[in-house]
Image (cartoon, rainbow, N blue to C red):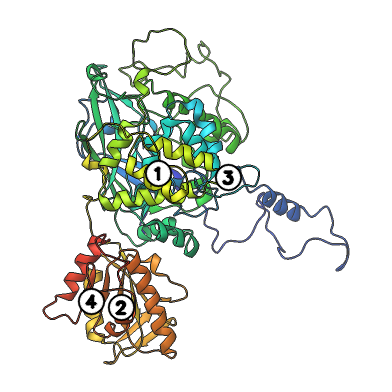
Amino acid sequence: MERNKNAKDAQLEQYRVNNYGKKMTTNQGLKVSDDENSLKAGVRGPTLLEDFHLREKLTHFDHERIPERVVHARGFAAHGEFELYKSMKEFTRAKFLQNPGSKTPIFIRFSTVVGSKGSADTVRDVRGFAIKFYTEEGNFDLVGNNIPIFFIQDAIKFPDLVHAIKPEPHNEIPQASSAHDTFWDFVANNQETAHMIMWLMSDRAIPRSFRMMQGFGVHTFRFVNEEGKAKFIKFHITPVLGVHSLVWDEAQKIAGKDPDFHRRDLWENIEHGNVVEYEIGVQIIDEKDEFMFDFDILDATKIWPEEIVPVQMFGKITLNQNVDNVFAETEQVAFHLGNVVPGIDFTNDPLLQGRLFSYLDTQLLRLGGPNFVEIPINRPVCPFHNNQRDGFSRQRIDVGKVAYHKNSLANNTPSTSTWKEGGYVHYAEKVEGRVIQARSDSFKDHFSQARLFWNSMTPPEKKHITDAFIFEVGKVKSADVRQQVVDMFVNVDKELATKLADAVGVNRPKGQQVNVSAASPALSQASTPRYPNTLKVGVLIGSGFNGKEVKAVVKTLMNHGVVVDIVGEHLGSLTGADGVKVMLNETFLTASPVLFDSLYVVGGKAKNQAKFENDIEQFINEAYRHYKPIGVATTGEVIFNKSDAKPGPGIVIASKAGTDFSNDFIQAITQQRFWDRNIYSN
């Protein structure tokens, strides 16, 4: 993997240290003669306090951990670049958005929200999607999620939300899950959550990969151009590979089989040179049109339907370099919504306004003081000069005796910059009103867009949402809370609420759903792009296989960018009936059907034939129940016929007359899921 050749990588290079082939020293540079034994008075005598190497080593070890993030603790990140392909000069004066073809270094951290640092990747949760742009005018942080809205409208509710969704304090259970009493009690008593809950119960909350999920800025921001004219905007990031998800049973099992599933997927794809690419764009609303919609554009629990306000794509994001050290980069990176550049400004979204305080404040404890910007991953690539001084772990050495403004001793420098010189000037919005603690009436419709989301789903997506509700609310011990949830979501859909009531043992709801018939096709994943490249196929194989057949199929798969794992009863070499050899890199014990997007059932012979066939049958049954494509070689049909799987959608069998097996299998892999498969038929 080649490194990026950009300003940020060049800056980081001066901090990278390769210890390979070097002599061990203390942190003071003193060469160490013994790192196996502490200094003692005699071989069996007491350890001596003067052993400075022991003290330094243990002291550093004792202080290696820093507080994990309260939310977004579990994260993984990568370096890349943003390339502008359409000038946004008409809308913003931000320099990195002016000239098509220009490139800006970036760093993206993906994360779950609720779980601790050691929790699993595939839990049902919102995913953080935070981007740091290292621009020539300073760092711009787009601190978003993979869902375009949020649970609450006002930041004053954020501590309540997090306290409710985190493990319950009396027993610290459950970990990384919203399926418990306090969260659903919060939901039922704070009905502004309704729209977000629909997204959380949808497939969006269990993405297949960081590479296959959208990102959103969530809030309404402003673009301000060189003339000082502003537009309201929302940021959108869309994966080139399309938006794809796991199924819930699969997600739960992956959490046990490979808790690092998402981070491993990102790491390996970048290491192998596979494209990790997104498009980025904005929705734009004129200031004069602020009040023309049936929703408030400053409400963070609302989307701007794309059919009404189209997304204008303007650039490409590519991730192409893994971190060198997860702690130094992924854990120490500090995002803050207040990190903006000229041409990007804020709005009166009350959730955004609170986050502007909180994201800066949280770094002071987590990273030990105000100098976290000097940590290499956080440093801007442009020079920075001000009168801020001292504090824990100050690295910068400011020369001179003046540290205040205004001054004459330093010719009044560092000096401020005018608008024309690139100084950040806040947008001159006219503000008027009485000081009050209240919400606008335009924020009070909590169910219309929740209903819009439901209307936009396909039948399989609606079933997944219904099943998710039944699972989550079914975990709630309080019957009263379960009833409150049912009574709340009848406002979204009566049939959904009725099925939920029947499943969780409470009374059916008496209310009615809101009168909204509109749908937004952009909200469904059904029409997302689909490609076979980077999807994983498990080849289930034993000795005596048809080498010519298998070799041709595997070659076709790899030519289409499919990742192939050869799975058998042992690692190492395996020989076919015609002398062709393959190398097995996984076993039935180390692999699992939930870790593959598709299976290619080859079959063959093994030392323990009964166990071999049973293992393959279990793989087939699991993949079949998860609606995945399955290819069956001529030698694998006998085992396939013993399984629970039946010929039908997504099942490609080589022995069928006239079948172009390789191409049919590629098409099935590309489709990914076959929701019309009846997995419960006899």
The residue labelled by disc 1 is 200
- Count residues near mark 4 (Cα–Cα under 10 Å), then give few for <14, some for 14-19, many for 20+: many
Residue 553 disc label: 4
Quadrant, the C terminus: bottom left
Residues tagged 3 and 2 counted as in contact (Cβ below 8 A)? no
| Residue in view at x 56 percent, y 46 percent | 477
Quadrant, the N terminus: bottom left
The residue labelled by disc 3 is 167
Q: How far, Cα to Cα, is label 4 from label 3? A: 48 Å
- Depth check, mark 3 against mark 2: the one in front is 3
Image spot of residue 243 (x, y percent): 29, 50
| Residue in view at x 42 percent, y 16 percent | 416
Q: Earlier in the sequence, mark 1 or mark 4?
A: 1
Image spot of residue 58 (x, y percent): 72, 53
The amino acid at mark 4 is: Val
Q: Nearer the viewer, residue 628 or 109?
A: 628
Q: Earlier in the sequence, mark 4 or mark 3?
A: 3
The amino acid at mark 2 is: Val
The residue labelled by disc 2 is 601
Q: How far, Cα to Cα, is label 1 from label 3? A: 17 Å
Q: Is residue 330 above or below residue 42?
A: above
Image spot of residue 38 (x, y percent): 78, 61
Residue 331 disc label: none
- Count residues near mark 1 (Cα–Cα under 10 Å), then give few for <14, some for 14-19, many for 20+: many
Q: How far, Cα to Cα, is label 2 from label 1? A: 35 Å
The amino acid at mark 3 is: Pro
